[in-house]
Amino acid sequence: MDKTKIIPIVFLVIILGVGFVAFTFYGEKQKLIVYNGEIKEKNAKLEKENDSLSYKYKKVEREKGNLEKKVSMFEQELVQLRQAKTELNGKIRNLSQERDMLVEKIEEARNSISARQPVVANVVSQEQSNVSSEDHWADIVRSKASLQAKVSILNEKLIETKEKAIILENENKKLSLVIDQLTKQKESVADDIKFKKRTLQVMSMDLVNEREKRNSAVKELKNVRRENARLKREVILSSKEKIDLQNNLKETIGRKESFENRILSAEQMLKEKTLVLEDLRQELSGMVTGEEEGLSESVSVELPPIVVKPKGTLGTRELKGEVIAVNPVDKFVVVNVGNSSNVRIGDLLKIMRSGREIGTVEVIETRSEISAADIINIADRAVIKEGDVVLLDR
């Protein structure tokens, strides 16, 4: 197979392979971007849920504090009511004892009065003039009346005390029910708080895991971007090499055609000189037929040599070049100086325009006639363009 056909096929295979790798990395990049977006959405949802749960947790804490305060107040009121109930029960017992004593005194007074009535009836006539006995009976009647008044007052107080005791018992029952309800609410709130704490812990762990996954995805995305930039540089360098090889191939084909033309012309000249030689031989054979036997020398025609001049080679190292491509996204340039100009990886190149230095680049990859270099620094408000002059900074 002709070499002129093999070289384009090889470059086509290389370009297809690079394109496939670039397409694969682009698809992975798009997947990572979509996955990163989903992770961001989940993270935002989790943060919103976390904020709402924190707000609800704080609200429940406040309600719990208010309920605890109410429970403590109710307990204090219940203690006070129990103390008041105890005091009222003591007063009721004292009043009952006083009532019993008064009833006993009244009975004794009645008995003494009923026992003295016949004696009084017999002696009244005899002691009508005795003022002291009348006063005595008047005192008895007054004491009886006062005792009856006290008994009625004590009965009223006893009734009121019983009513208050019944009211306090009802209130005590109501307070007991309220305390039971508050206790149940407190237990439910405590269970809810525990559940929400566990939920917050689980959500926090999920959030940490999502952040770790996001960080790993970001790292992978950065690696993919660096690999993509490297592949872009490789593609650009391969494209430049392809162009150079195509130009060299065209030059080789042109030289081949020129060589073939020269060979054809030389063959034509050789044929013409051969014909001339035959004619000369025939003329000589006719003119000197008698001297053919003595002729020992052969006639030879010396043709001019065909000289092929080789292509001139670069004798000295080229120290000056130009920027032929700029990638502002990945911040690298391609210049038209390479291994043939003794450019090595790590060399610093100055970017010049109108005799002024506008930036510095560092060589990261080299080929025969081109090199790729990362942009190290650049002057203020300056932009590297194609055609800028490149000088070796050595």
Image: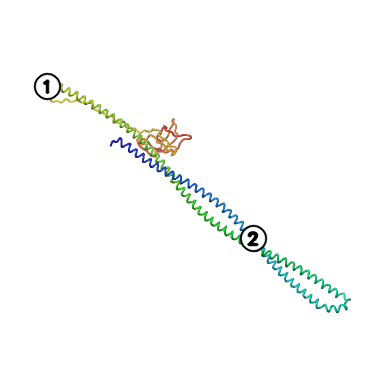
Q: Is residue 251 above or below residue 134?
A: above
Q: Earlier in the sequence, mark 1 or mark 2?
A: 2
Q: Nearer the viewer, residue 52 or 315?
A: 52
Q: Position of residue 318 (x, y in %)?
A: 36, 33
Q: Nearer the viewer, residue 259 or 101?
A: 101
In the picture, the quarter occupied by the N terminus is top left
* Mark 1 residue type: Thr
Residue 7 on image: x %, y %:
32, 37
Dividing the image into 4 quarters, which one contains the C terminus? top left
Relative image position of residue 49 (x, y in whole percent): 53, 50
Q: Nearer the viewer, mark 1 or mark 2?
A: 2
What mark, if any, has residue 367 been given in the picture?
none
Q: What's the amino acid at mark 2?
A: Phe
The residue tagged 2 is: 74
Name the quadrant containing residue 98: bottom right
273 vs 357, left or right, is left
Instruction: Please tell me whether residue 163 is drawn above or below residue 298 in the rendered image.
Output: below
Q: Is residue 158 above or below residue 15?
A: below
Q: Label 1 crowding class (10 Å Cα cut-off): few <14, some 14-19, many 20+?
A: few
Residue 289: which disc? 1
Q: How many C-alpha atoms fall within 10 Å of the one at disc 2: few (<14), some, or many (≥20)?
A: some
Q: Are marks 1 and 2 in contact (CB under 8 Å)?
A: no
